Amino acid sequence: MDDLTNLNDNLTAQEKEASEVFYGKVLGIEPSTPNINFKGILNQVFQYINIADVLDKVKRGTEYVVQIPSEFQGGFDAGDYWIMENSKTEKLWPSLMELGEDGRNHIVTPLSVKKRAFIQGNPTKDITNSYQNIYLQQQMNELSGLIETTLDTVKRIEHGQMDDRIALLEAGKQGVILALSQKNEASRASAMLLAINNINIAQNQIAETFKRRVTEFEALPKSAIGQFFRELIKTGYLDEKDNEYNEIQEYFNLYIQSTRMLAYAYIVIEDKDNAQRVFDMSVDKIKNIDFSKLKTIEYAHKGKSFEKIYKDTAAYLLSEKQVCLDDAKDYDCLSISLSGKDILEVIADDKTISKQKTEQG
């Protein structure tokens, strides 16, 4: 592979010394990463990349990073291999990088891609897509747990008055979990749409309850004397107002969680536009709620720290929206952290398999 050697020799000093490559959204994996078959991924990726040609550059006790973009563009022809290049940035990829003492990745050499393997498909894309699907399912399961906890609290508050809304949200939550277990994509999409409908109705009903509880909140007297007289008239007045505020806060938590679940449900069926609309519509609803009476709870907590659900509520939803949309983005790069020992073992295994195939053939 003289072409690869020459190409590596022609890298500029700047590229060799301080080249920490950024590809946007990166899936970083290492031996301890949960929910992955690390060795299986290494074998899969190294069947695709011609890493044996860098054997003389790999040191057993050194830590390395192999970066592989999910999408390839262009390429330099080198016989049976391609040296890939990003046509926009002119950076070479994939790359073998050494983890330096300064904590930065320094390019050791570009890696060539086997033409035949590349034409047959891009395993990097398959790996990142598979991991993203697992991650989204984990998010849905986590949201289900949060909603379950909040529902238990709301049930105690309402004493059965929210049965319809609770039943709808529980049905939607259960529908999502069952849909995610479907193997057939068409069946999964159909089941998700049914679940989305239930979550959507429940989320809107929760929003209306939250709005009603906020607007019906009786304002507290501003002065300490006024609050004192309320306590004289009704013992435990301030404690009751605190309890009422905490109940409203539970509704707000339930509304946030149901909004997130609705948006992520759309993400799972790859409908990013509606996922975004879910948050935008939620922000509009929050902005139309009059929190002026609820804010008077501060009069009873002067100088004390507590969660002000009426403060920056829309901004909080917008930040949740950004997290959701970031999660929905495809990975731009697979970054594998491994040791020189790992690389040498994969190369040795590959040589053994090739030798056996030759002997059998």
Image (tube, grey):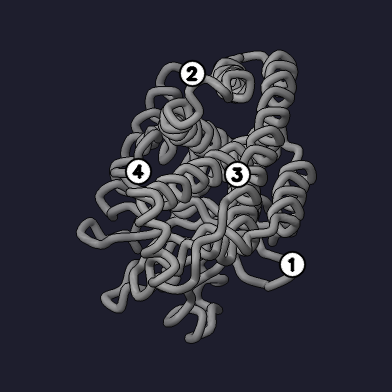
Mark nearer the viewer, 3 or 2 = 3
Mark nearer the viewer, 1 or 2 = 1
Q: Give the residue at the far left of this rendering.
A: 61
Instruction: Give the residue number, with chain letter if any, for mark 1.
Output: 87
Does 272 sit above or below residue 15? above
Label 1 and label 2: CA atoms lie apart by 40 Å
The mark found on residue 33 in the picture is 4
Mark nearer the viewer, 3 or 1 = 3
Q: Residues within 10 Å of mark 1 (few under 14, many from 20)?
A: few
Q: Give the residue at the far bottom of this rendering.
A: 13
Q: Inspect the image, locate mark 1, and give the three-letter code of the amino acid beneath it.
A: Ser
Along the viewing direction, whichever of 131 and 314 lies nearer the viewer: 314
Q: Does the CB distance between marks 2 and 4 fall below 8 Å?
A: no
Q: Residues within 10 Å of mark 2 (few under 14, many from 20)?
A: few
**In x, y percent, where is residue 28?**
44, 52
The mark found on residue 361 in the picture is 2
Instruction: Give the residue number, with chain letter if any, for mark 3.
Output: 213
Label 3 and label 2: CA atoms lie apart by 77 Å
Does 216 sit above or below residue 349? below
On the image, which quarter does residue 164 sit in? Answer: top right
Residue found at x 76% / y 55% = 284
Q: Earlier in the sequence, mark 2 or mark 4?
A: 4
Label 1 and label 4: CA atoms lie apart by 32 Å
Q: Residues within 10 Å of mark 4 (few under 14, many from 20)?
A: few
Q: Earlier in the sequence, mark 4 or mark 3?
A: 4
Residue found at x 63% / y 36% = 206
**In x, y percent, where is residue 134?**
50, 33
Q: Earlier in the sequence, mark 3 or mark 1?
A: 1
Q: Inspect the image, locate mark 2, and give the three-letter code of the amino acid beneath it.
A: Gly
Helix, strand or loop at disc 1? loop
Helix, strand or loop at disc 4? loop
